[in-house]
Image (cartoon, rainbow, N blue to C red):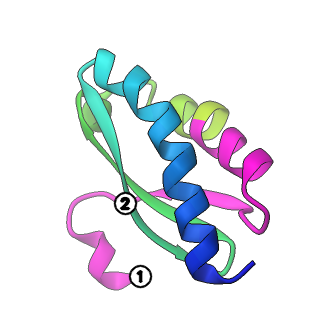
């Protein structure tokens, strides 16, 4: 699977998760995929939530690692950090 196919699969999986985050006032944005790592940005209520680490690792990362071959890690980008990836 090339990077373009992996990114499409990542976006498809994130679309499954988004309704649950939106229901709680948050959302997730795909930023980039690089070397097995998915970079996302948690926004809205998710950005300031105490449970963001749990949501990210126990929910988002678990699902992406299980469903997308090649994904090994998920990292939340805060602010304008996406320019440094």
Q: Residue at x 71, y 40 (%)?
A: 62
Label located before the other in sequence (2 or 1): 2
Q: Residues within 10 Å of mark 1 (few under 14, many from 20)?
A: few
The image position of residue 48, as x and y in percent, is 26, 33
Position of the N terminus, as image quadrant, is bottom right
The image position of residue 40, as x and y in percent, is 42, 57
Disc 2 versus disc 1: distance between alpha carbons? Answer: 9 Å
Q: Secondary structure at mark 2?
A: loop
CB under 8 Å between discs 2 and 1: yes
Position of the C terminus, as image quadrant, is bottom left
11 to the left or right of 46:
right
Task: Say if 25 sits above or below 73 in the image.
Answer: above
Residue stretch rendered in magenta on the structure? 60-85
Answer whether residue 35 is magenta in the image.
no
15 to the left or right of 34:
left
Residue 50 makes an appearance in the image: no
Task: Say if 4 sits above or below 16 in the image.
Answer: below
Task: Say if 29 sits above or below 72 in the image.
Answer: above
Give the numbered dot on residue 85. Answer: 1
Q: Residue at x 49, y 32 (%)?
A: 17
The image position of residue 60, as x and y in percent, is 58, 40
Give the numbered dot on residue 77. Answer: 2
Q: Residue at x 49, y 55 (%)?
A: 11
The image position of residue 34, as x and y in percent, is 57, 79
Residue 44 makes an appearance in the image: yes
21 to the left or right of 60:
left
Answer whether residue 64 is magenta in the image.
yes
């Amino acid at each position: 699977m090339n990077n373009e196919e992996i990114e499409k699969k990542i976006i498809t999986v994130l679309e499954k998760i988004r309704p649950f985050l939106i229901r709680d006032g948050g959302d997730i944005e795909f930023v980039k995929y690089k070397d097995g790592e998915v970079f996302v940005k948690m926004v809205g209520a998710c950005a300031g939530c105490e449970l963001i680490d749990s949501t990210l690792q126990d929910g988002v990362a678990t699902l992406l690692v299980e469903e997308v071959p090649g994904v090994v890690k998920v990292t939340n980008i805060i602010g304008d950090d996406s320019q440094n990836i």
